[in-house]
Image: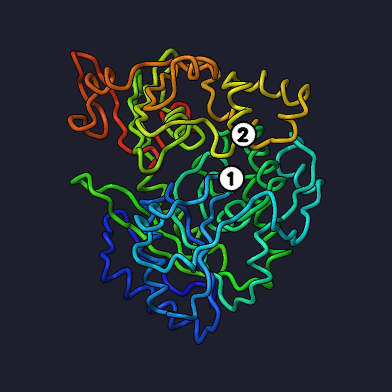
Amino acid sequence: MSLYFATGSETTEISSAELKQALHSALDALGERKSVLVIPPDITRLHSRAGEITRIIWQYYGDRLKAVLPAIGTHFPMTDSEIGHMFGDMPRSLFHVHDWREGLVTLGVVPADYVKEQCGGLVSYDWPAQVDKLLPQGGFDLILSVGQVVPHEVIGMANYNKNVFIGTGGKEGINKSHFLGAVYGMENIMGRADNPVRRVLNYASQHFAKDLPIVYVQTVVSKNRKGDLATRGLYIGADSECFEKASELSLKVNFVMMDREIKKAVVFLDPNEYRSTWLGNKSVYRTRMALADGGELIVLAPGVKEFGEDPTIDKLIRKYGYVGTPRVLDAVKKNEDLGANLSAAAHLIHGSSEGRFSITYCPGHLTREEVDCVNFRYADLNQMTKVYDPAKLVDGFNTVNGEEVFYISNPALGLWAFKGRFK
């Protein structure tokens, strides 16, 4: 049995009681387990309901839950207050910190010929299937990978084995997967469950991870008519079927296909989730296919205080900036520091408008000089918030001082595209 629970629709709203009942039903079907690991996302996926799900798993298994490993990838480790905010009163001793540079195990290597074939020859390198050593060496008889399926800039649709191979992965695997997606092109990947990056990860799952007792718990979340978060789907399974079903639903509820382009977009970044442009540039990724040539993206970012979630990557972003694909690729060839950190190079490509529209950042902590140096425009947060007040704007089109503005309160919940740009 590969699918233990599956429910969802565009109008479904799963309550806390229903969520608990569904999880208990699936965990019952899994049979007796003595040593359990949970891999949830970090605070940047606060709205996934992964915190609530992890708490339910803890209550179900008790002391048989041996560890929780947030899938932080290259993000900062979660703080104690963030753990409390997301996971409640769970014992802090359960939480482990993933180190994406050390403490890894390479399960196998995807051949370069396979990688090259999947992307039409755009890159030609092998890909190491790296995971945190806790997964294969922790003695677990069940690993529950928890997360939200939603359109994603690197891998088309977030979650499934990305949570394992990227969220608990290593430097080389993260670098190469991000770069593969960037070179292939975000517009060719976002909103597509099947793409070169996913195929590489699927190869790793099928060939190298069969001995890991992984079961995936996938949610689909969107806003309802009242503007409140609603869990539209829950899919629990041991292979790609649960991910594929979740992806189908996510495209219906998270992908907004627009009849006309956006001339001006205003995106708000919740300071509890977004502290860096590494994360905050979801505002760029998720709107780029909807923005008109010559349009403007305004990012209200009260919590943003740095560029990278890692000191080395932060330094590279400051050094090279969001200058467009040709210049970034040229810098990769000519500079050892960027060539050795391909995920940073990929991020610089992802965060550039390629000169097609302007990006104005309004950060709570970065200076004008810092923003200017990475090739974004700067505007004062307080002044811009007075004009574009998140408390007054509604998601979608608004009129502000006689001007039409498209407002997005949380870019992580969707993907917006003009019909003429999505093929």
Q: Are marks 2 and 1 in contact (CB under 8 Å)?
A: yes
Q: In the figure, is residue 70 to the left or right of 196?
A: left
Q: Which residue is mark 2?
A: 313
Which image quarter is the N terminus in?
A: bottom right
* Residue at 64% in and 53% down: 169
**Amino acid type, residue under disc 2 in the picture:** Ile
Give the Cα separation between the discs numbered 2 and 1.
Answer: 9 Å
Check the image and report above or below for 41 versus 191. below
Q: Which residue is mark 1?
A: 74
Q: Position of residue 373 (x, y in %)?
A: 54, 16
Check the image and report above or below for 188 versus 362. below
The one nearer the camera, 418 or 291, is 291
Check the image and report above or below for 252 versus 18. above
The one nearer the camera, 282 or 303, is 303
**Amino acid type, residue under disc 1 in the picture:** Thr
Quadrant location of residue 135?
A: bottom right
* Residue at 38% in and 51% down: 46
Q: In the figure, is residue 92 to the left or right of 388?
A: right
The one nearer the camera, 249 or 283, is 283
Q: Position of residue 348 (x, y in %)?
A: 59, 27
Q: Position of residue 103 (x, y in %)?
A: 69, 58
